[in-house]
Amino acid sequence: MAFVLGAGKMGKAIAYDLMKNNVETRICDIRETNFPNFFKLDVRDKESLMKEMKKEDIAISALPYDFNYMLAKMAIKTKTNFIDLGGNSYIVEKELSLSEEAKKTGITIIPDCGLAPGMTNIIAYHLWHGKAKEIHIRVGGLPQKPKPPLNYALFFSVHGLINEYLEDSIIIKNGELRKVESLTGLEEIVFDGFGKLEAFYTHGGVSTLPNTMEGIKELDYKTVRYKGHAEKIIFLKRLGFFSKGAREFTEKILEKNLPKNEKDVVLARIYSNEEAMELIDYHNNFSAMARTTGFSTAIIAKMILDGEIKEGAHPPEIAVDAEKFIKELERRNIRWV
């Protein structure tokens, strides 16, 4: 019934939650792994992928964002509902352009179903409710015990992480849509139990919100890190480590050297000029990043399977009933307060 593409940390969390909620689920990856209902598949083998997608009611991409537009187009061909974790606003825009084709085929496509963008878009839109003049989103996945020099650990795809630091951030300032350089806009931010942290602009976090929050005057997204992180990334960027020719090498170095199995915490705060909501979620069986990303995605997949979301291609904040979504998160001990 459900087909998860990618058996990394996020894919396993998605599959686990679906299975726990009585959804028959298969999961695939190019690399072997020990997980129920796993089989080996290279998604670049389009003939084999199409054959497998035709068997399922919904396909869920937990792969790097580069695959998602191709997979969305294939979902239309195979008449399979499709959702993904997003991560690149320009690819998401291309996916949403498939809305009419999806409607004709009778399927639903929703990009951006993870933590940020995804869960945070739904919560932000819920807070906005067509009235708030400002929405500010602050999110970070952090190791509970940071280690120098970057005070960070690898909780999701390094390719997606670098993209957040490289691409411009989209904001709305004084009612105008603007692009600002990522890693700028540094501000101090405090969460209970964590002291003084930093937050800075990164790409992808607002995603579709500038289009769906019609008339909003101020909108931005910043990533939360331990103090000093942005300065070090800027230094690497100035040295050319993220340039087109060096990016692949840098990703391999970070993949090899950043801690991977650290216990983590997800910190999130979304506030308007009227009210605020906050999330602090700790590692619990799954990493906090996998819980908040994977379980969020699984909730949306189940809503589609249960016929609660209309056909076509939609951003999550438009497609998903926020109040029901928040209740489903609470069932999983993911609590916005």
Image (cartoon, rainbow, N blue to C red):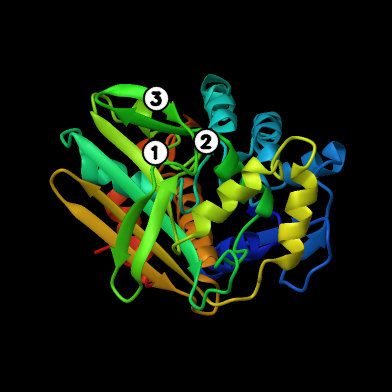
* Kind of residue at badge 1: Ala
- Residue 108 circle label: 2
User: Is 230 rendered above or below residue 145?
Assistant: above
* Mark 1 or 3, closer to the camera: 3
**Dividing the picture into quarters, in which one does residue 180 lie?**
top left
Total count of labels = 3
Q: Label 3 neighbourhood size at 10 Å, few (<14), some (14-19), many (20+)? A: few
The location of residue 244, given as percent across then percent down, is 75, 35
| Mark 1–mark 3 distance (CA, rounded to whole Å) | 26 Å
Q: Is residue 239 above or below residue 27?
A: above
In the rendering, at what x and y percent does residue 153 appear?
A: 60, 67
| Dot 2: element | strand
Q: What residue is at 56 percent from the left and 44 percent from the top?
A: 165
* Residue 109 located left or right of residue 249: left
Q: Which residue is drawn at 29% across and 30% down?
A: 213
Q: What residue type is labelled 3?
A: Arg
Name the residue rendered at 54%, 68% in the picture: 151
**Of discs 2 and 3, which sits in the foreground?**
3
Residue pointed to by mark 1: 319
* Disc 1 to disc 2, C-alpha distance: 10 Å
Tag nearer the camera, 1 or 2: 1
Whichever of callouts 1 and 2 sits on the residue coming sooner in the sequence is 2
Q: Is mark 1 on a helix, strand or loop?
A: helix
- Asked which secondary structure carries label 3, the reply is strand
Residue picked out by circle 3: 178
